[in-house]
Image (cartoon, helix red, strand yellow):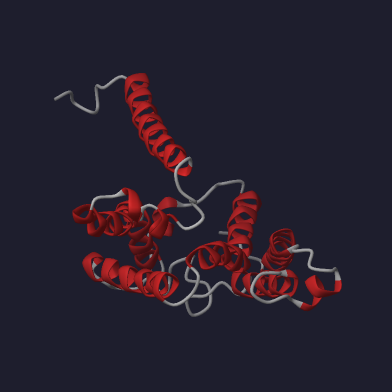
Amino acid sequence: MRDPATAPARAAAGWTVFGGFLAGILVCGTGALAATAVDMNDPEFALQPLLPGWFRPLFLLAPVLGTVALNALTAYSAGLARQAIGLRIRRSRSVLVDGTVSVTPTLYALLVSNFFDTVGTVPQLTVVLLGPSTAVHATGILLRRNRYDGVALGDESRTGPFWYTCGFNLAGVPALGAGAAASALRVDTVCSGPVAAALGGVDLALPAGLLASSAAYALLMRRVGATV
């Protein structure tokens, strides 16, 4: 086996891209062929007549295992995020918490509500928080010109420069709240915010959240005089 430190960068990138491309072609090709025989609006039930009886439990198990594999990096990142904010929890327990939180709505989507409606709705609702949080992060990078004290970032003590006030940045928290509020007023999914309703269902949740949180964070950072 070749040492990763001496492996050619082009070969590593090329084989990684080829593996992802090949898997995508096989899966998409199989789905396209299946769509010529059955109605794929509900593949969970439509494909069952085409599958042998012994394979049906494996077919239902495959999405579950695939979801676990796809979210391995997400669970890893979530554990790092908890450690970054000072929450002392073992990585194994962190993964169990993530799994429980993830499986619960998935079971609800599969067994109670319409699966595809739920899958389509969840990303739209997460925009209310993900958009503003991304804007705060990006604005912070721009304000600091991407210059961070690496040693200080790892200092979780109360005297550390990133401890701010009782562990909270008095600029970041209100900015995130302002962006989430602006986004919620303009979202149009399972429920319509008042602004979205007034505009006839036009969903401006993402741009509104980005702009509101970014502007609020930039203004508040100057007000509190943060230098790190």
Q: Residue furthest left?
A: 1
Indicate the quadrant where residue 22 lies.
top left
Q: Nearer the viewer, residue 211 or 112?
A: 112
User: In the rendered view, does 176 fall on the left or right side of 74?
Assistant: right
The x and y percentages for residue 212 are 74, 65
- Residue at the location (80% across, 74% down)? 197
- Residue at the location (49% across, 51% down)? 39
From this view, report whether residue 21 is shown above or below residue 163: above
The x and y percentages for residue 190 are 64, 74
From this view, report whether residue 205 is shown above or below residue 143: below
- Residue at the location (54% across, 66% down)? 122
User: Quick check: can you spot residue 157?
Assistant: no
The x and y percentages for residue 79 are 33, 63
Image quarter hosting the C terminus: bottom right
Q: Nearer the viewer, residue 65 or 49?
A: 49
From this view, report whether residue 201 is shown above or below residue 64: below
Q: Which of 38 and 124 is in front in this view?
A: 38
The x and y percentages for residue 126 are 56, 66
